Every structure is written in structure tokens, then in C-alpha cells.
Amino acid sequence: MTTAPAYDLLLTGGTVLDPAQGIDGRKDIAFKNGLVAEVSDRIDPSNATSSLDVTGKLVTPGLIDIHGHFYHGGNQTAVHPDEICLSSGTTTGIDAGSAGFINYEAMRDYVFPAHRTRLLAFLHVSGVGLANNKLLGGGLHDMRMIDVDQTSDAIKGNPGFCFGVKVRMHINAVAAWNAHEAMRSARAVADQSGSRLMVHVSGTPIPLPDILEFMGPGDICTHAFNGHPENMLDRNFKIRPEVQAAADRGVIMDVAHAGVHCDVEVVKHALEQGLPPTTISTDIHNPPPDRTVYKMNDLVSKFYAMGMTLPDAIAASTSTPANVLGLDDTLGSLAPGMCGDAAVFDLREGNFKWIDSAGNVQDGKVRLDTFLTVRGGQIAWREGRLMEMGEC
């Protein structure tokens, strides 16, 4: 009688970097039934149905992008999740307000299930999310788009899928005379639903300290490192006291790069003063022709080039966002029993450049190039190819 292999998939010989476990060294990793089954110095390849030698490569937990736009087909700027996420080692994507309480169900029931990437959401405080942006430029030019009760009910009714409410404090999204009311409404949604508040702070029409007053522990200040007026630095390039106070009380300082919402010089000043990003995220979307957006593997590489240690940059892309979302019991680590999500990278050496829309250029000598993405214990992307994906 033939005994079935103990494991479905085995990765051997890689350098495992798992900040949640404090692991940084050569390990073999085995997967079974969609979960991490074993992490050891040596695992016999004959014990696995499929085995792959990844010697010389970096193995991390699957990356978590806490701010992207993945409502593919739901609005014009949303990206195809599998093509973007799996190719960058990202196994979990959080949609940041593409939909509101009126139109999120199609996202939940049809669009997201058609993809292998794990897709979760923050609902926009506007009832239709970003659906009217192409025509109106923003979601809150008419404050009647906000319904606190229905939005909070939608979040409460979708535990494990909806993680909070998003509001865009941008001059094109909400008028200055309505901005404080929009913040009060978003705060009320978060409080009524017992969830998190995510606030877009780049290009705000009101003072940044006014926004931060609404935010408490676990709330997400997204685009925190932007270089627009009312950013986190004062005129002497020092961290503003209100920003430091917010970080000290547990407000999440999220990158949400987007090309236009993260300034290299702001990041460098913040790093020098001991305020690194809490979470690294993309704000990935289909950009206009003059804008460059980056995927998660490039952003980890960029922040490493700017001075973050590689373990810290990986933590900001794996274990920390998992903890922020309250999902650290299943995501963000390669400990046995966790979801079988992993990324395998080539550490490519060379001369690399990353740009932002302010014209800043960041040079670097190392880039993480995705070799393999494992989702749910199965290879989902390998060397430039999606292994399998759903259709929308």
C-alpha cells in the first residue's frame, strides 16, 4: 500500500525572513491543506507531492497590501488583483474604499471571489465609493452621499470582509467647508461599527492636526509621508508634534505610495527622526500617463534603499498589517498552522532607481524580484506566469 506524501508543497534551501517569528536564516517550509505545516532546517523532499529548491532566494510570508484598489470592473482606476498582487509576492490585498454601502455587494460576491488573491475591504464613507470620481473628481461633493447608519450596518454585517471606513480628505474629493463634517461622519461610522477609520491625508483641504484629532489607536493615517502642503513635517523639516502624538497613541502611519502621495525627502526626514512607516502599501491603481505607481516588491526594495532594514521593511509589509487588521492569528507569518501564503524573491543586485512625482530619485543596489508566490499552499505565480486565475 502506497502512503500519501505528508505535504503538498515543499520549498527547500531558501533564506526565510519571518519577522513575526524572529527567523532570518536557511529553512525548509512545507505546506499541507492550504496551511504552513512545518518549518525546519531540513525536510525530506520525498515527503512532499511537489518540491522546489529555492536555494539562494529570500522567502517571506505573503505580502499584505493594506491600501490598494482592486474592484476590477467596478471603477476605471481599479487594477486586476491577481496580475498585480501575485506578481509582486502579495497574497492579501485590502481595497481602500473603492465601494460604499450601495455597491459593495458586487465586489464581495462576484469580483473578489473570481481571484486567487485574498481580497478584503474598507468601505468608503460615500455610499458609492469611487464610482463617481471620473465624472465629479471625488466622492463627497454632495454630502448626501453619506449615510452613517447604513455604512456602519454594512461593515458590521460583514465581519472578516469589511475592516473599517475610508474617507478621502483631499481638495478634489471634499470641499473645505464640508471636510470637518465628513470627518465626523467617518468617525461615527467607525465607532458605530466597532471598526477602524482610514483617512487619506494627502492634499487635505483642512489642517492635518484637525484630522489627527479624530484618530485613535488602530486608525490608519494613509499617505502619511506625502510631500503636499499640510504634511507631517513643519517648515524646519521636523516631525510636527501632533503627528508624533498621533503615532505615540497608536495611529498607523501608512505609506500608500501611489507615486504622487509619498515624497522621498519626507520619508528620509521621518526616518532620521525615528518615525518609520508603520505599514508599507501601494495605493495601486491604473494611473494617468504622467504618474508612476509601484507594486509591493518594489516598495519594499525602495524603503530598504532609503535606510529601513530589510527585516523592518518586510515586517511593515507582512506581520504589522496583519496585526493592524486583527488577522495576525492567520496571516503575516510562516509559523505552522498559519495560512499557506509565501513569497520567494531573487535579491537582484545592480543600480536601481525609484522616482516620485515630486521629481525625487531614490537610488538602490538591491531589488526584490518575485520568483514565486504561494497562495493557500499552492504555487499561484512563478517566474512571470500566473499559474491559474479566475475570470471576471
Image (tube, helix red, strand yellow):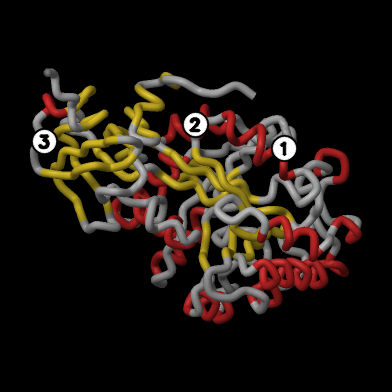
Comparing 197 with 156, the one in front is 156
How packed mark 1 is, by other alpha carbons closer than 10 Å (few <14, some 14-19, many 20 or more), is few
The residue under label 2 is which amino acid type?
Answer: Arg
Q: Quadrant of the N terminus?
A: top left
Give me the disc on residue 116: 2
Q: Is residue 306 visible?
A: no
Q: Residue sitting at 63 percent across and 61 percent down? A: 198
Q: Residue sitting at 45 percent across and 32 percent down? A: 86
Question: Which residue has dot 3 on it?
Answer: 43
Comparing 350 with 129, the one in front is 129
Q: CA distance from mark 3 to mark 1?
A: 43 Å
> Percent position (x, y) of residue 89?
40, 36
The residue under label 1 is which amino acid type?
Answer: Ala
Q: Residue sitting at 57 percent across and 62 percent down? A: 224
The residue under label 3 is which amino acid type?
Answer: Ile
Give me the disc on residue 353: none
Q: Residue sitting at 57 percent across and 64 percent down? A: 220
The quarter of the picture where residue 340 lies is top left
